[in-house]
Amino acid sequence: MYYNKVEICGVNTSDLKVLTDEEKHDLLLKVKKGDEEARKALINGNLRLVLSIIQRFTGRKENLDDLFQVGCIGLVKAVDNFNTDLDVKFSTYAVPMIIGEIRRYLRDNNAIRISRSVRELAYRSLQAREELIAINENEPTVEQIAERLGEKKEAVLRAMEAIVEPISLYEPVFNDNGDALYLMDQLSDSSTGDEVWLENIVLREALMHLNEREQRIIKLRFYRNKTQMEIAEEIGISQAQVSRLEKAALEKMRKQM
């Protein structure tokens, strides 16, 4: 399916407008002053960003219209909360907001349901496990946990297995002003994870703040895996100069990131 040629939520995605960075900046300044027309234009001009993000979640077989609408909620939040005083691209700020909104939707609409009784037994089992560890100073067996609870071993085992994946991935591990960070957010994927994708966006942003020579050295060093000596020969300076320029460039990127 070609997502730039279909209709989502009644919107012909091939007609979606794409704003330049300058246009986004100008609209953001107007939005900050309360210009509703500019707000609408900025949202409409970033719908392709939402479209590109929801493609990462299509493997879940979720309804595209639903994901698009949820992603648009994240986009609206990004527009309303973006700080124009920061030297950060709007897309760098908006992407995690949109992803976060979609993840919350997927969490709340998880198709896997666990009965309350099973969940309660699982949590009672975890509590009993902690108590036994404190008493015996070693990991208890399922039999010991079941005995402490007065439950059958099989029931305890089923309950604990039931929460291992579906719930634990979406358990909040940190909460900041009502916006929870879930264990799922901490899991990485070396090839397609959102962390890698977002990291690439931030790296590109940081690279743009380097001068042409610094960019070339960083790209040769870390993207093409060349040694400092090889880089020195290629661009016609000493290895010591390459080392100094590389160190300065990395420091600039670190501050930017």
Image (cartoon, rainbow, N blue to C red):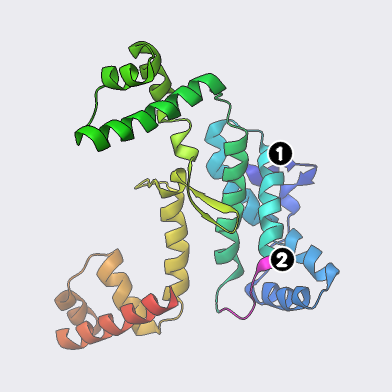
Residue 73 in sight from this viewpoint: yes
Rendering quarter of residue 85? bottom right
Q: Position of residue 6 (x, y in %)?
A: 71, 41
* Residue located at (61% from left, 36% from top): 108
Quadrant housing the C terminus: bottom left
For mark 2, what is the residue? 80
Quadrant housing the N terminus: top right
Q: Which mark is first along the chain, 1 or 2?
A: 1
Residue 35 tag number = none
- Circles 2 and 1, Cβ within 8 Å, touching? The answer is no
Q: Position of residue 121 (x, y in %)?
A: 45, 22
Depth order, front residue of 223/199: 199
Secondary structure beneath dot 1 equals: helix
Amino acid carrying mark 2 in the image: Asp
Q: Residues within 10 Å of mark 1 (few under 14, many from 20)?
A: some
Residue 65 tag number = 1
Look at the magenta stretch and give its main secondary structure.
loop
Rendering quarter of residue 222? bottom left
65 lies left or right of 209: right
Secondary structure beneath dot 2 equals: helix
Amino acid carrying mark 1 in the image: Asp
Depth order, front residue of 161/156: 156
Residue extent of the magenta highlight: 81-86
